[in-house]
Image (cartoon, helix red, strand yellow):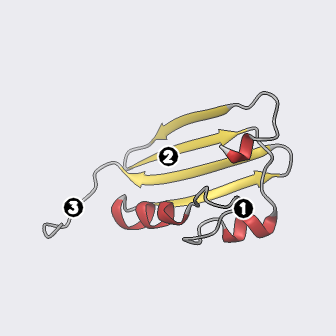
Amino acid sequence: MHGLADVDSGTITITALENQDMVQINIEDNGIGMTEDELLQAFDKFFTTKASKGGLGIVRDLARERLQGDHCLQSKIDRGTTAILLMKKNIENDANE
């Protein structure tokens, strides 16, 4: 993961929380973090800070369309980034898919 490339001892922590209707998955790292500009562009389909390393654009579509939920990123330079994915527990599938 290129977010941990410049960190001597990188850690990724995944936690899940739930309430009656929703599940929240948090993916947190202690990497290099993201600038405000990077955060604003992070979910653009083809945005990446590293050539040929991919981006998060597909996550936006997955969260909203397939999982009937939402997503967000929180980040601080030199402290890391947290990606939050919210989704319904019971997803209604379209019969045509």
Q: Nearer the viewer, mark 1 or mark 2?
A: 1
Give 67 or 42, whichever is nearer the viewer: 42
Q: Which residue is drawn at 51% across and 52% down?
A: 85
Residue 49: which numbered mark, if any?
1
Q: Is mark 2 on a helix, strand or loop?
A: strand
Q: Crowding near pointer 3: few (<14 within 10 Å), some, many (20+)? A: few
Q: Is residue 95 above or below residue 1?
A: below
Task: Report which residue position mark 2 lands on.
Answer: 24
Q: Distance between the residues labelled 3 and 1?
A: 34 Å
Task: Report which residue position mark 3 lands on.
Answer: 93
User: Residue 45 placed where, x, y %?
Assistant: 54, 71
Give 22 or 53, whichever is nearer the viewer: 53
Q: Residue at x 37, y 62 (%)?
A: 68
Q: Crowding near pointer 2: few (<14 within 10 Å), some, many (20+)? A: some
Q: What element carries label 1?
A: loop
**Mark 3 or 2, nearer chain start:** 2
State left or right for residue 46 relative to residue 9. Answer: left
| Residue type, label 1 | Thr
